[in-house]
């Protein structure tokens, strides 16, 4: 009887061990695959930095543009951003142009940035502007300072997005292809 109990116990332990180890092996394989994908993306980014640089426009809606230096905070952000970041002005508005080479959560709504800087957000709405593109616009206010901000994301085929989350999931699912161009326009009121 003892021998029978031991065999039964060994079988139960053996099956329990396999039931535990096999999923762990599968997870390790998935993690390895994800790491390989990230490493390949990083290698591609490091091999061709010149291909990443976006050509900056020299005018915006008929007005000449001049580049602005990035702040220290923007420089730190840009160092980890999977693409490029540039600030330009036409003397009346500030444009933040970002090119994005891969889906990333680092491309987030401008409302998040302004809230993080202590602004109150109001009048958030979608607009169709003169270029016939849809933009997400809002007013950011901190004390007496008010800024009207409009933003959009456009993919390589010209498909536009007004919501960073919708863009992210479309890009991740392969329904939108990059490189993507995110444009944010801020006008002091």
Image (cartoon, grey):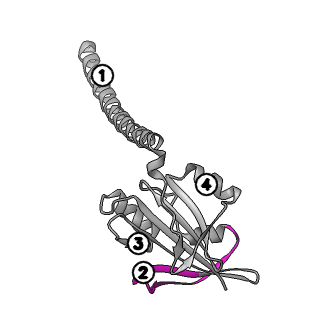
Q: Is residue 54 magenta?
A: no
Q: Residue 18 location in percent, x, y?
A: 30, 28
Camera-side residue of 135 and 121: 135
Cα–Cα gap, marks 4 and 3: 22 Å
Cα–Cα gap, marks 2 and 4: 27 Å
- Sequence-wise, the earlier of marks 4 and 3 is 4
Q: Secondary structure at mark 3?
A: strand
As drawn, the residue found furthest toward the right would be 143
Magenta-drawn segment: 117-138
Mark 3, other Cα within 10 Å: few <14 / some 14–19 / many ≥20:
many
Q: Which mark is residue 134?
A: 2
Cα–Cα gap, marks 3 and 1: 60 Å
Mark 4, other Cα within 10 Å: few <14 / some 14–19 / many ≥20:
few
Q: Which mark is residue 9?
A: 1
Q: Which mark is residue 161?
A: 3
Mark 1, other Cα within 10 Å: few <14 / some 14–19 / many ≥20:
few
- Sequence-wise, the earlier of marks 2 and 4 is 4
Q: Is residue 96 left or right of residue 19?
A: right
């Amino acid at each position: 009887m003892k021998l029978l109990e031991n065999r039964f116990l060994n079988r139960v332990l053996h099956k329990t061990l396999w039931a535990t180890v096999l999923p762990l092996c599968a997870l390790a394989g998935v993690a390895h695959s994800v790491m390989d994908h990230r490493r390949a993306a990083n290698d591609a980014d490091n091999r061709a930095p010149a291909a990443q640089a976006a050509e900056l426009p020299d005018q915006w809606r008929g007005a000449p543009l001049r580049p602005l230096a990035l702040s220290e905070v923007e420089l730190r952000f840009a160092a980890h951003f999977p693409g490029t970041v540039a600030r330009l002005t036409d003397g009346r508005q500030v444009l933040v142009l970002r090119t994005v080479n891969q889906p990333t959560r680092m491309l987030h709504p401008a409302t998040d940035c302004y809230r993080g800087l202590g602004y109150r957000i109001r009048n958030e709405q979608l607009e169709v502007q003169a270029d016939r593109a849809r933009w997400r616009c809002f007013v950011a206010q901190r004390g007496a300072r008010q800024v009207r901000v409009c933003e959009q994301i456009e993919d390589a085929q010209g498909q536009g997005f007004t919501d960073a989350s919708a863009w992210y999931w479309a890009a991740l699912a392969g329904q939108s292809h990059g490189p993507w161009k995110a444009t944010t326009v801020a006008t002091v009121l």
